[in-house]
């Protein structure tokens, strides 16, 4: 017998061995159960997820516009997480051509940044927006993230929609509640734009898709069909507050109503006789005394009533006679058509050539188109008009022209980037020439239309994090916000500037900003404001950094409005950039 065989295993070791063995078996069993259970749990969780997704798909829109918005976000939009847009005035480009205290504005820069600024300064303050964005023809007209989008780009529609969506959402908030937006577009993006606008402005606020004839001649280069129209898509911020659109009658129509009496214009029209359903059979007496009987389309009593007041006349000429009535023009305006034949692109090129004696800009719109659109809205002649794809500045020109024609006080805000120096050399130069006068392409002196202009460039205050802006950066923003405050209040003329504040004035009112953290210099500034106000008797709007005061702190200023700065600006930027 070997030593091994004779080895006795102690009882307690045996016990331990069995315990370990049985617990391991149990563990294994548990493990298997848990794996099965977890698998089941995972499966159930996944089923739940899929169900939720299905539900979400069922709830989300079954119809509408879908595009790839994430693939290539726009850099200018992402920049706004750490760059706060402001404006810097280029003072030497100020145009003063009349002695009013008013001014129109031209902003050079990316319109996404300009629209952010305007979201603070002009929220719900604009009556009419006209834009003529790149049509995305694939022919070098649309630039996205500094690259031309050509027809080979598979995401060209997505890029264009990203671009437009961001800007139209901001534009929506700038419109007054009865405001209107006009957007020129052609078949490249019309369908997409319509759906996008339905989403942003609401399908209920769609007013019309006007079709504009763009060229009069036949176009040999065209393929399949000679397309000679584009569109103007029109939405109201709230369509039910927007008045009907009317157009004045044209010259030819007006000429017909050549007579005039105390009840307005008319012409003599032939009185219609013989109507099948007509029972008005009676005799009338001709000037010669001869009586004729007929079926008339007026009761006898009414006929003689009109004859008496000279609204009907009877003409007799030998054997011939006729009855005529006054066909009246009851209104000098008619409901606008959804087709425009009158303002084509050839005119637009001539408009530009007339000013620059050169083509100067590739795709302008005709002045008369914009004038027409501004007129059909039947809005007052003191409206505020915005164009954030201003190009050669046609919208500004149209506003100045209309003001000259009817003595109106419409104002414009134009924004365009400086691609190929357009803003400086075309937009600005055009407004300057037409407001101050110029010699046209035929050598004729053209009188200036008047109107003042201030030129701004977009700039930035850089921050680490838009959510938590440091006090130092808030002070920097306040110090650089004076242009924003001036344009917000439409009061631009600098009266004084000190190291602690700035004051702007117009004929009656004053806007001031106190931009120091320390309040030491606030009292002297308030004294100064009180003195300036005594000259004008208008209101004073005082912006104070982090304003902790009530009106009682400024007894020296009579008609005072206190406003906080810069938190309201930051609030707007945070809302837009969703932080
Ligand atoms: C078709 S043109 C507008 C023409 C204008 N309606 C006219 O009559 O001259 C479009 C203009 O939008 C400008 N634009 C395009 N993208 C822009 C952007 N992101 N910011 C500012 N302007 C932009 C272009 O520079 C171009 O001048």
Image (spheres, rainbow, N blue to C red):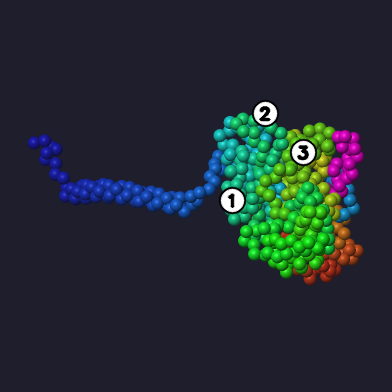
* Circle 2 or circle 1, nearest the eye: 2
Q: Quadrant of residue 508?
A: bottom right
Q: Nearer the viewer, mark 3 or mark 1?
A: 3
Q: Residue at x 57, y 36 (%)?
A: 155
Q: Is residue 483 left or right of residue 450?
A: left
Ligand 1 under 8 Å from disc 2 Cβ:
no
Does 125 appear in magenta? no
Dot 3 falls on a residue whose secondary structure is helix
Q: Residues within 10 Å of mark 3 (few under 14, many from 20)?
A: some
**Circle 1 sits on which residue?**
198
Residue 19 percent across, percent down from the top left: 22, 50
Give me the disc on residue 347: 3
Mark 1 surroundings: few (<14), some (14-19) or many (≥20) residues within 10 A: some
Magenta stretch encompasses residue 451: yes
Q: Is label 2 in a helix, a strand or a loop? A: loop
Can residue 82 be seen by looking at this rendering? no
Residue at 73% in and 64% down: 283
Earlier residue among tags 2 and 1:
1
- Pick the front one: 370 or 9: 370
- Distance from Cα at disc 3 to Cα at disc 2: 20 Å
Say if mark 2 contacts mark 1, CB within 8 Å: no
Please give the range of residues in magenta: 432-453
Residue 381 x %, y %:
79, 56
Q: CA distance from mark 2 to mark 1?
A: 36 Å
The residue that label 2 is drawn on is: 220
Instruction: Name the spot of residue 321 as percent of width and height, x first.
Output: 78, 56
């Amino acid at each position: 017998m070997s030593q091994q065989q004779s080895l006795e295993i102690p009882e307690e070791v045996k016990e331990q061995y069995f315990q370990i063995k049985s617990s391991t078996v149990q563990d294994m069993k548990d493990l298997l159960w848990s794996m099965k259970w977890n698998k089941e749990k995972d499966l159930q969780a996944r089923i739940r997820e899929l169900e939720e997704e299905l539900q979400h798909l069922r709830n989300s829109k079954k119809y509408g516009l879908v595009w790839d918005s994430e693939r290539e976000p726009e850099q200018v939009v992402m920049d706004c997480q750490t760059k706060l847009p402001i404006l810097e005035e280029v003072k030497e480009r100020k145009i003063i051509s009349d002695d009013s205290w008013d001014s129109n504005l031209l902003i050079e820069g990316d319109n996404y940044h300009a629209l952010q600024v305007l979201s603070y300064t002009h929220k719900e303050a604009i009556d009419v927006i006209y834009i003529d964005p790149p049509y995305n023809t694939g022919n070098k007209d649309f630039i996205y993230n500094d690259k031309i989008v050509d027809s080979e780009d598979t995401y060209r529609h997505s890029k264009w929609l990203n671009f437009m969506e961001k800007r139209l959402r901001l534009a929506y908030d700038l419109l007054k509640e009865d405001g209107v937006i006009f957007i020129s577009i052609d078949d490249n993006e019309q369908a997409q734009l319509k759906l996008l606008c339905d989403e942003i402005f609401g399908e209920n606020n769609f007013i019309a898709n006007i079709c504009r004839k763009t060229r009069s001649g036949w176009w040999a280069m065209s393929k399949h069909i000679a397309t000679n129209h584009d569109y103007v898509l029109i939405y109201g911020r709230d369509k039910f507050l927007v008045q009907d659109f009317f157009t004045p009658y044209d010259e030819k129509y007006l000429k017909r109503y050549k007579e005039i009496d105390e009840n307005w214009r008319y012409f003599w029209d032939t009185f219609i006789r013989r109507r099948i359903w007509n029972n008005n059979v009676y005799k009338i007496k001709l000037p010669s005394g001869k009586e004729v009987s007929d079926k008339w389309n007026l009761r006898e009593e009414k006929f003689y009533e009109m004859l008496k007041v000279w609204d009907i006349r009877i003409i007799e000429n030998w054997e011939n006679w006729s009855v005529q009535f006054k066909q009246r023009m009851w209104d000098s305006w008619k409901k606008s058509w959804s087709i425009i034949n009158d303002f084509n692109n050839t005119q637009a090129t001539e408009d530009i050539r007339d000013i620059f004696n050169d083509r100067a800009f590739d795709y302008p719109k005709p002045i008369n188109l914009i004038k027409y659109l501004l007129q059909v809205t039947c809005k007052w002649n003191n409206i505020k008009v915005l164009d954030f794809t201003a190009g050669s500045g046609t919208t500004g020109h149209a506003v100045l022209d209309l003001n000259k024609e009817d003595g109106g006080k419409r104002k414009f805000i134009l924004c365009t980037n400086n691609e190929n120096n357009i803003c400086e050399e075309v937009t600005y130069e055009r407004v300057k020439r037409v407001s101050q006068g110029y010699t046209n392409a035929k050598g004729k002196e053209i009188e200036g239309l008047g109107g003042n202009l201030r030129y701004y460039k977009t700039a930035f205050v850089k921050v680490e994090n838009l959510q938590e802006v440091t006090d130092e950066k808030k002070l920097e923003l306040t110090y650089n916000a004076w242009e924003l405050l001036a344009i917000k209040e439409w009061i631009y003329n600098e009266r004084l500037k000190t190291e602690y504040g700035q004051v702007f004035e117009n004929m009656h009112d004053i806007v001031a900003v106190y931009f120091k953290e320390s309040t030491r210099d606030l009292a002297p500034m308030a004294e100064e404001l009180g003195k300036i106000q005594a000259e004008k008797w208008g209101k004073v709007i005082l912006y104070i950094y982090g304003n902790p005061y009530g009106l009682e702190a400024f007894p020296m200023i009579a008609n005072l409005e206190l406003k906080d700065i810069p938190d309201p600006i930051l609030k707007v930027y945070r809302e837009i950039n969703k932080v």
